[in-house]
Amino acid sequence: MAELADALDLGSSGISVGVQVPSLAPFIDYNPLVIRVFIYKITIYCIIKKEREKTMNQDIKIETPNQNFKMRVAGIIKKENKILFTKMNNNDFYCLPGGYASLGETTKEALERELLEEIGRPIKVETYQGFIENFFQNNKKQNIHELSFYYEASSQNLPTENFTHTEIDHGFEITQNLFWLDIKSLDNYNIKPQGLIPFLKENKPLSHIIINEKKSQDI
C-alpha cells in the first residue's frame, strides 16, 4: 500500500491542494465496502488535485466573439541610457519584456516568471510603476482589452549588446529578439503601446493610463 500512496503523491500534496488525504489504515481489515469507499475518495482527491494544478497555470484571459481580455505584466529594464525591448520574429513592433499573469500568482511573481522565460536569466523585480488599460486591434484584427502592470526591474548579468533567447511557451518555441534601445530615440521605433513612450523618456511613474484608438488620458 505504501507504493500506492507514493504513486498517487498522497501526503504532502494533499495539504497543498487543501484536500484531506484518505488514510490507508482501513485496508488492514480488507473490508470490500471500505475498499470501494477508499478508492472513491482517492479518485475525487486526484480529480481535485489535477484541476487545481491546471488552474494555477492558467493565463488570465477571456475570449469572446467581439472582444478579448488579457492581463499582462511587463518590466522596465534600464542600462545606462537604454531600455530593453523585445521583438518576436512574427511581429513588426517592439514591446517591453513580459507576458500573461496566471491565476493564483501576484503581478510581481508573474513578472519574475515571465522575465526568466523570455530573457533566460533571473531578473530582480523592483519598484511598481503603474498600469495601463489598453484598447486596440491586434494583427488578427481582434479587439483587445489589455490590462498591463509595469515594474522597474534589473539584472547584473545581462549582455551589453542586443541578444536573442528561445523560450518554450505552451510547447512552442518562440524566439525573443532583445534590443537595447536608446531612450532619447524611442520615438523612432514602432513601440507598443505608443502611449508608454513619453513616460519612459521623461522617467515618470505611469500611475494609471487609459489608451484607446481615439484618446489617451491619465488618472
Image (tube, helix red, strand yellow):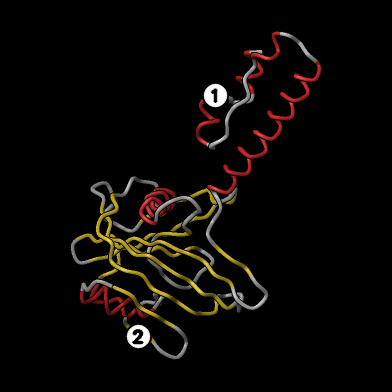
Which residue is tagged 2? Answer: 217
Looking at the rendering, in which quadrant would you find the N terminus? Answer: top right
Which residue is tagged 1? Answer: 11
Q: Which kind of residue does numbered mark 1 sit on?
A: Gly
Q: Is residue 30 left or right of residue 78?
A: right
Q: Is residue 35 left or right of residue 170?
A: right
Q: Quadrant of residue 86?
A: bottom left
Q: Position of residue 42 (x, y in %)?
A: 68, 28
Taking the view exactly as shown, the residue that stands out farthest to the right is: 32
Q: Quadrant of residue 138?
A: bottom right
Looking at the rendering, in which quadrant would you find the C terminus? Answer: bottom left
SS class, disc 1: loop
Which label sits on residue 29?
none
Frontmost residue, 78 versus 39? 39
Frontmost residue, 46 versus 203? 46
SS class, disc 2: strand
Point out the tag, 2 or 1, that comes first from the N-terminus.
1
- Mark 2 or 1: in front is 1
Taking the view exactly as shown, the residue that stands out farthest to the top is: 28
Q: Position of residue 13 (x, y in %)?
A: 53, 30
Q: Residues within 10 Å of mark 1 (few under 14, many from 20)?
A: some
Q: Give above or below for 7 relative to 136.
A: above
Q: Give above or below for 135 relative to 33.
A: below
Q: Quadrant of residue 192?
A: bottom left
Taking the view exactly as shown, the residue that stands out farthest to the bottom is: 214
